[in-house]
Amino acid sequence: MVKSPNQVFFCPEESQFYAQCLEKMVLSQSHTTDPIVEFGAGDGSPVIRALLNSSFEGVVQGFELNFEASQLAKLRIEQYGLGAYYQIHNACFFSNAPANARYLIANPPYLPAPDNQLYMPSLHGGDDGALVTKQLLAQGCEQVMLMISAYSNPVDTVDFALQQGYEVADFMVTPLKFGYYSCEPKVRDSIAKLKCKRQAFFSERIYFLAGVLFRQKSAATVCLSEEFLKVMTAL
């Protein structure tokens, strides 16, 4: 089953990094039966890769609106025999996710643009790219692991998370080249405007993508917010 990049999100480098972040910061740290909900499961490959490399024994409930992507994810889950650990729902996360979910993971849409008339409309993250990320942080889950782009207003995103009662508990960062989706003229124009307002950070060819674990504040939490932002705003 082959789909074009306009039907199903396709970026091997980003998907592999998301999987690494899930394995290190979520699956290896969670109790063996803690359920996890996922916003935007896509083709399922990041979670599948992470599950295959971990001893996690709970269940990941993935929500994906794109029918083609959800069907591809279900096929791959079946091929790897992971049906007991990863379940895909072709439904809206915000309307159907369990209200009492403690753990949330996502690689949310983060392309900044004035509208969603893009190569792939579902990747639109609002004017500054942080709209959906903030919506997920507002759900109130105990722990939230999100992918955050340095060109999508990361400083304001962290400030919003702090206001919601979170702290940065852990993070991983990788450099990525601008690709098929982020090189669309409308997106690059929005990114350039954000940079002028110190809301986007990147060099001519690369930007930083981070996997960030937000955790509700507690006496035992070591906050890494300042360290994280120092890395993300370095370019």
Image (tube, rainbow, N blue to C red):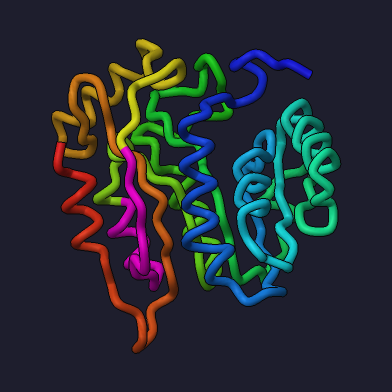
Q: From where the camera sits, is residue 163 visible?
A: no
Horizontal side of residue 26 vs 59, given as left or right: left
Residue 166 part of the magenta segment = yes
How far across and how far down the image is residue 149, in percent? 35, 39
Furthest toward the top, the residue is 185
Question: How many numbered dots are placed on residues in this image?
Answer: 0
Q: Provide the residue span drawn in magenta.
A: 157-174
- Does residue 148 appear left or right of residue 59 in this picture? left
Image quadrant assignment for residue 69: top right
Classify 128 as above or below 99: above
> In the figure, is residue 206 to the left or right of 141?
left
Observer-nearest of 54 and 166: 54
Q: Nearer the viewer, residue 89 or 28?
A: 28
Which quadrant holds residue 61?
bottom right
Q: Position of residue 24 (x, y in %)?
A: 48, 60
Q: Position of residue 82 (x, y in %)?
A: 80, 51
Q: Is residue 179 above or below residue 103?
A: above
Locate the C terminus and report the quarter of the image it occupies: top left
**Residue at left offset 36%, top offset 47%:** 210
- Residue shown at 45%/15% (left/top)? 180
x, y (%) of residue 156?
27, 51
- The N terminus, quarter of image: top right
Which residue is at 74% across, 62% downward?
A: 59
User: Within the magenta stretch, is there residue 113?
Assistant: no
